[in-house]
Image (tube, coloured by chain):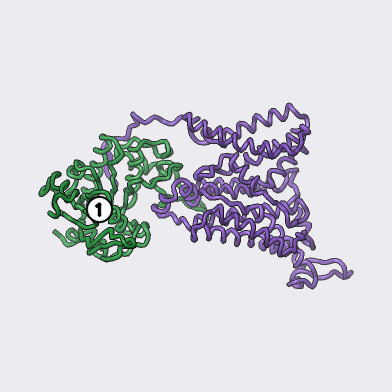
Chain colours: A green, B purple
Amino acid sequence: MTSTETTPVLELQGIGKEFGAIRALHGVDMQVLPGEVVGLMGDNGAGKSTLVKIIAGNFRPTHGEVRFAGSAVHFTRPVDARAVGIEVVYQDLALADNLTAAGNVFLGRELKRKFGPLALLDHKAMAARALELFGELRSETRPDDLVKQMSGGQRQAVAIARTRLSNARLVMMDEPTAAISVRQVEQVLGLIHRLKEQGVAVMLISHRMPDVFAVCDRVIVMRRGEKRADKPIHETSPEEVTALITGAKETA
Amino acid sequence: MAMPLESPITFSNVGRIRWWQRGIFASQTGYVLLALAVLLVVMHFASPYFFTEGNIQNVAKNFSFIAIATLGVTFVIITGGIDLSVGSMMCFSAMITSMVMTELSTPGGLGASLFVHMAADGKTVLANVPGLILLISLLAGLGVALVAGLVNGFCIAVLGLSPFVTTLGMLSIVRGLGYVVSNGRGSFPSGPDADYFYALTSGDVLGVPVPFIYLVILALAMAVVLHHTAFGRHVFALGGNEKAAELTGIPVVRVKIEVYMTCALAAGLQGIIISGWLGSAPANMATSYELNVIAAAVIGGANLAGGIGGPLGAIVGCVLLEVIRNGLVLAQVSSYWQQTLVGVIIILAVLVDRIRSRMV
């Protein structure tokens, strides 16, 4: 193993977050290695979303340090996180309904062509690249259809396609399989496998136990703002994880 | 890191959206355009005067008087905002333009010695550089509009105030300032450059009124900006889902400020053009024009909830309002009916769109 492979892509040290008197997170340490798929599980209010938002640059942690690829990072906006290679698929997908699929995939990163002093959008190139990405995701989505007119699975594909535009090193997916059909769940899980093959680290935040056990290498369980378990998937079972989530079992 | 395509994508379950279910054919703008065409045909048969050259010129000129401002407001409406201060902005911009022009053209006035000198007869005022006074006064007029737009944008985007309240306040502030600077009397363009001013604002080229020419150029520019630049894309995204726009790294604050400044600039230009036609900029000029402008935008298909709208819709809305007004005059119906009818049309246009989108 070379040293680059053992450097965690993401490392959290003693992360804590307080909203006024409410302690949302406390002393969370974790590591994610390149090409590793980590499941983040926990009940509502366990602190999953807060943790994801800290990593994605929406919030700044009250305590602790976030290290990305070995160096400490301080994000003030989501764009900062994206710039270093962290992509997020938000639970509500963050799509603009009135734009086309291609428009949403390239939102904020539009391809342009120079016409003298003018930089005009390159609609053709964006549509072609978007179609390619939808093909990889095996989603029947036309780049020039409005998102407004799309099914839940197509919307999901648009949101995931967006993360494939740049050379992301960590992709976080917040409940990517919650609102889509069985066939599309298979597609999303397939995509996670493909990301892994390319050395991209994936953090899967999900309530669906079968999905987590199908693709993850490791599972992290959160409860009441703290990390309660962090173990390889083959050393645990759905029963144990459920017990950890509900608090029937305190730590593993 | 392109991933290999296992097999080309096939669309077995997802049909193509039919051409008549997409683009302009599926928009309120399309329906209103159709209504307008029908109305024009009806007008043609109802009145022999309607399609005379003089009347068409008149109509073209009249709708151009609110259409440029409507383009600006449409920008704001697409982002999901509103600008109620356009009427006041028109007046203030026009007033500053003519006041600066008068001041610079009056010997003994502030800085006038740089721009004008007396002719040998001791009465006629001559410009040192023809057109320079006009240029500076136009820049001054548009400049104050830009500043007001910047304040609007700052309050809304940075301070997070509601667009309705902010621009309602600005409506009053700017109107008040207009009364203050002119002492309630208004002003009129004068001096050696006044003739250029009138030619640029109320003249015509080959029988086409200049305001109409400006309108066409600006509308085309707006169409390019909205549909073929990243800025336009971001304007639509902001109206569609502001949170998504923020998360995907769109500079939301900057786009919003730019949109309100563009709107103010359009209103300022519109005001200057109106003052050229009126021959003066009275302090009560363009009072309540913001309502006509917003009505025209909404009739033309701009959605006050944000995310939908465009220059064609803005113009169609203005033309429809003007043709109805003109038609009522030709039909010798009391002009008091006009406002009532405009109100009915606003509601009808939005209603038809609602029914249509429920049917699809």
- The foreground one among B157 and B210 is B157
- The foreground one among B220 and A21 is A21
Q: Residues within 10 Å of mark 1 (few under 14, many from 20)?
A: many
Dot 1: chain letter: A
Please state the horizontal and vertical placement of residue B18, each as a whole percent of the image: 46, 29
Q: Residue at x 78, y 33 (%)?
A: B332
Q: Which residue is mark 1?
A: A46
Q: How many marks?
A: 1
Residue B312 can be seen, yes or no: no
Q: Residue at x 83, y 70 (%)?
A: B118
Farthest front residue in view:
A21
Q: Classify residue A79 as left or right of residue B6.
A: right
Q: Residue at x 73, y 57 (%)?
A: B283
Q: Is residue A87 above or below residue B178?
A: above
Please state the horizontal and vertical placement of residue B312, each as a whole percent of the image: 59, 41
Secondary structure under tag 1 reads loop
Q: Is residue B119 above or below residue B42?
A: below
Q: Classify residue B101 as left or right of residue A248.
A: right
Farthest right residue in view:
B121
Quarter of image, res B206: top right
Farthest left residue in view:
A235
Q: Which amino acid type is marked by label 1?
A: Ala
Please state the horizontal and vertical placement of residue B12, each as a whole percent of the image: 33, 29
Q: Residue at x 63, y 46 (%)?
A: B293
Please state the horizontal and vertical placement of residue B184, each as a whole percent of the image: 75, 61
Q: Classify residue A14 as left or right of residue B191.
A: left
- The foreground one among B163 and B268 is B163
Residue B319 can be seen, yes or no: yes
